[in-house]
Amino acid sequence: MQPSGFKISDREYWKDQFRLQELSGLTQVDYCKREGVKLDTFKYAKGRLSSRSKDPLPKKLLVPIKSAAMPQQPQQYLSIITFKGTKIECPVDTNPEWLGSLLAKINA
């Protein structure tokens, strides 16, 4: 849900919303319905922030694969420990491009 007294200019709130929507695997319409966010507001904020962004979304870093061994249920989590010892836990249906970008930044 949108925080009380929310502003389109609340960059961190909207960045979190956009990432959560990507991670959820839901369309913008379905995500906004689930979270109680107005779709028009979501799209407007996304457009405003992406036009100001200095760090565009990365190109594909990982190729998504389907595996029978990995159940695609939201309550299932994947644990990753990087060479630097950083532990990451995320849903198994996490967007692989986002995860690749995160790992690249952590290991940089």
Image: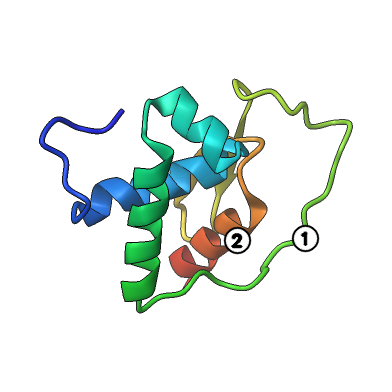
Task: For mark 2, give the secondary structure.
Answer: helix
Instruction: Give the residue displayed 46% in from the left and 53% down from the top.
Output: 85
Q: Is residue 56 left or right of residue 8?
A: right
Task: For mark 1, give the secondary structure.
Answer: loop
Query: How far from the left and from the top, in percent, is residue 66?
Result: 85, 42
Q: Is residue 36 left or right of residue 91?
A: left
In the image, farthest residue toward the right: 68
Q: Amino acid at mark 2?
A: Gly
* Quadrant of the image occupied by residue 23: top right
Quarter of the figure that contains the N terminus: top left
Q: Which mark is residue 93?
A: none
Q: Does the image show residue 90? A: no
Real-space Cα separation, disc 2 to disc 1, in angstroms: 9 Å
Asked if the residues shown at circle 2 and circle 1 are in contact, with their CB atoms under 8 angstroms apart, the answer is no
In the image, farthest residue toward the bottom: 54
Q: Amino acid at mark 1?
A: Val
Residue to which mark 2 is pinned: 100
* Quadrant of the image occupied by residue 47: bottom left
Query: How far from the left and from the top, in percent, is residue 31?
Result: 51, 33
In the rendered image of this protein, does residue 107 appear above or below residue 64? below
Residue to which mark 1 is pinned: 63
In the rendered image of this protein, does residue 54 appear above or below residue 1? below
Instruction: Give the residue displayed 37% in from the left and 26% down from the top.
Output: 36
Number of numbered callouts drawn: 2
In the image, farthest residue toward the left: 5
In the rendered image of this protein, does residue 63 appear above or below residue 67? below
